[in-house]
Image (cartoon, rainbow, N blue to C red):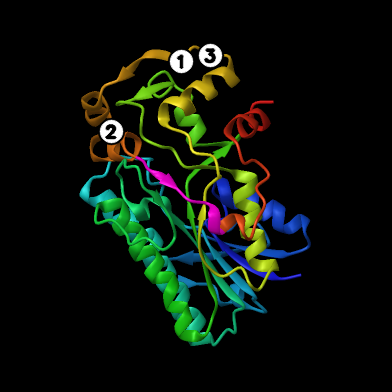
């Protein structure tokens, strides 16, 4: 059994992960701005505050905190929030661990496949590839750099570059299952690297239960789907009509602004390295969606 401190624990992934870890006899504590339970501890990245009690007998930190990438248009203020919510929070955790001299067994951080950039190409990206230079890649690079600093304290670091997370409780599917998105976007040829939330949470569980699961891994399912094929399979699963006319790029740019890039572009992401460590419960999209819309 391990004691795990979880940031972003009140979000979609955090709630599922807390349930999974608790069911497997781990003790989970949650950092939140508004503590509402006995295992909740207050933190505030704007005032550099974390309740020291959160670090008592601590084994691991899983860092999921971060403002939603696709929740709002990317204004200058929103861009700062997207970076600070991930980076400043990790920096605060690092300073506390260093000050309190906590001998963590591991620091596990989320990241995104946006590391490889918002572009569509024939290339299949692996963990060894260099980052892109656009804004979404910048977020991921700074996010990961903030995690890597824990190595200075001889703490093992694991980073999961996560694709579109599929869940019955909200997230991306809630947005996709709307008249605007239940159709091919742009030319529909952009890829949507995805992962079922059960597989993602199992990967996080693996990071605290197996010492050799360190380093950087792409948290995406093995099967590659384009926006067009993804939408058709979703429509078939939901028994809903998929709009036969593609939504033009300019409409999405009007509606979403700069954020449109993340739905109009997308390349294939390799799961080969991850599959050497983990067997996916949902390796194909049809089964993943059927498990959600059962």
Mark 1 Cα shell of 10 Å, populated few (<14), some (14-19), many (≥20): some
Question: Which sits in the foreground, 114 or 229?
Answer: 229
Extent of the magenta region: 266-273
Count numbered badges in the picture: 3
Which marked residue is nearer to the observer: mark 2 or mark 1? Answer: 1
- The residue singled out by tag 3 in the image is 240
Residue 267 on image: x %, y %: 37, 43
Is 190 drawn above or below residue 269 in the view shown? above
Q: CA distance from mark 2 to mark 3?
A: 24 Å
Please say if the residues under marks 1 and 3 sit with CB atoms less than 8 Å apart.
Answer: yes
> Which residue is outermost to the front?
122
Q: Secondary structure at mark 2?
A: helix
- Residue 221 in view of the camera: yes
Q: Are marks 2 and 1 in contact (CB under 8 Å)?
A: no
- In the image, residue 268 lies in the stretch drawn in magenta: yes
Q: Residue at x 32, y 59 (%)?
A: 131
Relative image position of residue 275 (x, y in whole percent): 60, 54
Q: Which residue is the site of mark 2?
A: 256
Cα–Cα span, label 2 and label 1? 21 Å
Residue under pointer 1: 242
Q: Residues within 10 Å of mark 3 (few under 14, many from 20)?
A: few
Distance from disc 1 to disc 3, alpha carbons, whole Å, reads 6 Å
User: Which sits earlier in the primary sequence, circle 2 or circle 1?
Assistant: 1
Which residue appears at 31% of the width and 26% of the height? 187
């Amino acid at each position: 059994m391990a004691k795990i401190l979880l940031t972003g624990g009140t979000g979609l992934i955090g709630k599922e992960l807390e349930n999974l870890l608790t069911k497997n006899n781990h003790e989970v504590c949650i950092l939140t701005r508004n503590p509402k339970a006995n295992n909740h501890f207050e933190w505030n990245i704007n005032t550099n505050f974390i309740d020291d009690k959160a670090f008592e007998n601590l084994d691991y930190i899983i860092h999921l905190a971060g403002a939603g990438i696709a929740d709002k248009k990317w204004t200058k203020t929103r861009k700062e929030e997207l970076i600070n919510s991930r980076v400043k929070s990790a920096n605060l955790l690092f300073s506390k661990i260093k000050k309190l001299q906590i001998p963590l067994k591991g620091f596990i951080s989320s990241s995104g496949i946006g590391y490889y950039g918002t572009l569509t190409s024939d290339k299949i990206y692996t963990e060894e590839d260099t980052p892109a230079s656009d804004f979404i890649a910048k977020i991921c690079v700074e996010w990961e750099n903030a995690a890597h600093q824990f190595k200075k304290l001889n703490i093992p670091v694991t980073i999961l570059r996560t694709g579109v997370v599929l869940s019955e409780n909200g997230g991306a599917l809630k947005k996709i299952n709307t008249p605007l998105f239940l159709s091919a976007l742009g030319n529909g040829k952009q890829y949507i690297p995805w992962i079922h939330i059960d597989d993602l949470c199992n990967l996080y569980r693996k990071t605290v239960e197996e010492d050799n699961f360190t380093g950087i891994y792409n948290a995406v399912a093995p099967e590659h789907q384009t926006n067009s094929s993804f939408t058709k399979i979703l429509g078939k699963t939901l028994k809903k009509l998929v709009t036969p006319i593609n939504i033009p790029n300019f409409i999405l740019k009007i509606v979403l602004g700069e954020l449109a890039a993340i739905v109009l572009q997308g390349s294939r992401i390799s799961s080969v390295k991850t599959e050497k460590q983990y067997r996916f419960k949902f390796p194909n999209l049809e089964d993943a969606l059927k498990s959600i819309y059962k």
